Structure formats: C-alpha cells, structure tokens
Image (cartoon, helix red, strand yellow):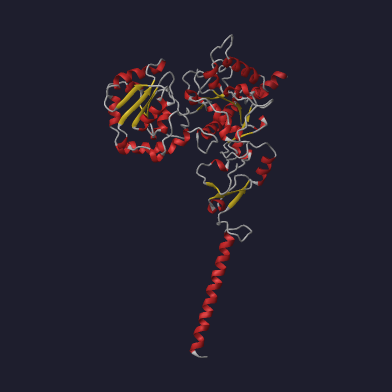
Amino acid sequence: MSEKSVVPSRFLFYLMIVSTFLLILSSLFLLQFSNHSFIPRSVFKLILVNNTSVYFTPNFKSEQNKTYPFSSEDLQSHAQRPMRSRDFICPFSNSSQKMVSLGKQRKIVCDPTQALLRVFMYDLPPEFHFGLLGWKGRVNETWPNVNNPNRIPQYPGGLNLQHSMEYWLTLDLLSSNTENVVRPCSAIRVENSSQADVLFVPFFSSLSYNRHSKLHGKEKVSVNKMLQDKLVQFLMGRREWKLLGGRDHLIVAHHPNSMLDARKKLGSAMFVLADFGRYPVEIANIQKDIVAPYRHLTRTIPRAESAPFEKRPTLVYFQGAIYRKDGGVIRQELYYLLKDQEDVHFAFGNIKGNGINRASQGMALSKFCLNIAGDTPSSNRLFDAIVSHCVPVIISDEIELPFEDILDYSEFCLFVRATDAVKNGYLLNLLRSIKRDKWTKMWERLQDIVQHFEYQYPSQPGDAVDMIWKAVSQKISSTRFNFHRKNRYHRSELVVKSI
C-alpha cells in the first residue's frame, strides 16, 4: 500500500473516533437534563401556571440534592389527617426567588396545605369593616370585589393612614381567594375554621375610633362603642372562641385608643398593636401579641434619589408635636436644648397645609432623625425616617419594635437612653462623633430594609403585610405550646370529678 493511501485512512479513522466520542458526550448531556425526555430543561424551563408561561431560574443542583423529611409511612399518615400550615413552607413566599411573567400575569394558586399560615376570617357584616369606608354592597354581599386594585374601597388619608393595618390585612386575605391577583402565599384564607391556624377578626377598630367615637345628634352610645359591644357578644357566643378561650384569634387594635371598651374582655386574643404603652401587661404583652409598623406618611425615597452624607446639610431633624403628656415630657426638654443649635431642625409641625411634604423634604436632607417618645412609646415618625433613609435616633426607653426577631435595628438606628439624651451636649456630641463611613453603612442598610415597612395591595414578598403574617405564625405556635402545657392534667381532673 502506498504512503499516500495510508494518510487519508488514518485521518478518517481518527475522525470517526472523535465523532463517536462527541455523540456519546452529547447524549449523556441530554440525559442529564431531562427525566424521560430528550428536551433539555436548561432551555427556559417554562412552567405553565393557569395557562400562563412563567420563567423560573433553573437550579438543578438543588433539585438533585433535595431530601424529603418524611418516609412513605409518614406521608400516608399525614394524608389521613388535616394538614397544618406549619408542616410545610410555601415555595412562592421566598422573596429571593426571581419570577418574570412572559405573558399576561395571573395569580399563582397556592395550595393551602403549603401556606405558612391558614387563616379563617369571620364574615362579619360590612358595618364592622368596609361599611366604615362608605362601601355599600348589594343585598347579602359581605365583601367588595378586590379583583381590580384600582376599584377597591379607599382608606381615608391623613393621620388615619398610620393605623390602617386592619385594612391591608383584610384585603390580603380576600385576595388569597381571588383570581388575577399575584401575592405571596404566606397566609391563605380557608373556609373551615377547624382547618385554620388562626382566626382573624376583620374589625376596622382604628378607623372606628378615629371616625365614630364621638356622639352625634341624639345618640346615647357612640357607633364605636356599639360595634365593640356587638363584637364581644358575637365572639363570646362562638364555638371557635370557646375552644381555646380566644387564644388563636387575631384582632387588630393598632390605634392606642382603639378597642378601649372591649379589650379587657377580649384580652386573651392576639392583638396587632403599635406598642404596649396604654395596655396592662395581662391584656397585651410581647409574648402573645404582634407589634406592627405604622403606615408611614412621608413618601418613600427611591434608592437612586437618596442623598448621601455630604448632600444632607442638616445634622438632626425633628418636626412634630412638642408638648406631650406622660412620657412625652422629654420632647420639651430636648426642644429647649436643641432649638438654637447650628445645623439642627427642631420645630413644631403637623399634617395641616403642606406639613407632610415639608417633613418628607426635611428628613430626606438630614443625616439623623429623632424619634422621641410622645403620649405613647412609638410614633409613625420612626417609619417616616426609615423610608427617607434618614438614620433614626430612638429616644424611647419603653419602645417595642416590629419584626425585631428578624431585624437588628442597631444596624440602621441609634438608641439613646432618655436620661442621657437630656444631658446638656450629650446628644449633639454623640451624633457629631459619627463619621461618614459609619453613617453610610447605616444609610445603605436602611435602603435594604425599607421594603419590610411598606403596606401595599396586592402585598409583596417581604413587605409589611407579609412580615406580619410571619410574625403571627410564630406567635400562634408558642401560644398553642403554652396552652397544651397548661392543659396536661385538665382532662384527668375532669374524669376524676365525673366519677
């Protein structure tokens, strides 16, 4: 055989080997990324939800390494009893998960057995909730249609808004059973109270106090008191209340004067509150109740518009009521100490005129914003400062803060004891000692956590509504734990008495 014929033969031989190797490699690659199909899952991984294409970033490694905490026997036993929400974590409540709609965005239906919290909401008449907003439904219609966010009944503005948690939580539960509303599935409304982790009482108590606590015309009893009396009578007669003595019920009473007539009788329930300033410890305490943030009144400053250290000429800012009763006396003392100091804004102010806009502009141009105890330990001023990216200085020894089990407030707030704050020169010396680098670190952290203090409809992962439901979930677990411990010998004692 000639040398010329050998060269092409070797070339063809090597070419066949390389081709065969590439064919085997490509086949293995395809098999790795498909279960029983040769269509690679790496191509978009489209999942159809309610006839909608939704794109999820693939995470093959996590799927391959996934382990399941239940054996087949465990799963069978779970299927034979009503599932509780704490047995599962809802996959769509993770705020870090990226989801982009490729078509018309529709609701992702959450399985109630996978929700963090299953909530039964009483169908109270509209006079307890949206009727207080002037909403009038058709005959026998209890709830407004919340399908379109632009057409839901609007909550009154001004100072009413700062205590509007009851409104946002109720809307969120209604939307959990509504099509075309995309929201987290931390809390899902269920129709059967026996399947619920918590029972929600949809009474707009803060609005009832703000709008209906005074007598009008020939009234002998205010509408606010009348509604509270009717609510107590209703709940006390319910089998659900009697079952655990109301311990698994959730009532929003965020305004410090709301539920004044009923709170003692309903004190075993979980309250959503601003703080514990006007409550005896046996009625409200951090062990059973939830502290919720005020709804801020100033606008949220977008990250791109947030002024850095050198563009905030005011060192410290406070604008609000100065002469207060109870613990608020410290405001007067600080006013006389600071009012004439350079680069300090300490002035009386309210929401009238252009008050909110002026406060928003002032906070956005200040390095530090004072949050001083007033009639109660807390105020919406703290949350106005947060959304303005103005580092809050908290001077309120008895304050309780929302979501403190998750958030470390010392990363973005300064805490000063009242006894130190009123010492001549102490506060200004402290604030002036904080240099640009330290302040900037706190300022950046403020921008990261702003979302946790936003009330909105529909709710979003990690916003104030979502965070409140998660806080409720933790409270209900500890509440049931304590109840079951106290009930250890109860049944035995009943048997002995019956013998």
- View extreme (bottom): residue: 1
The residue positioned 53% from the left and 80% from the top of the image is 12
Where in the figure is residue 416, as x and y percent of width and height? 35, 26
Where in the figure is residue 369, as x and y percent of width and height? 36, 28
Residue 368 visible in this rendered orientation of the protein: yes
* The quarter of the displayed image where residue 143 is located: top right
If the image is split into quadrants, where does the C terminus sit?
top right
Where in the figure is residue 170, as x and y percent of width and height? 58, 29
- Above/below status of 443 relative to 295: below
Query: How many labels, in total?
Result: 0
Residue 245 visible in this rendered orientation of the protein: no
In the image, is 386 to the left or to the right of 232? Answer: left
In the image, is 49 to the left or to the right of 403? Answer: right
* The quarter of the displayed image where residue 114 is located: top right
- Above/below status of 252 relative to 14: above
The residue positioned 53% from the left and 83% from the top of the image is 9
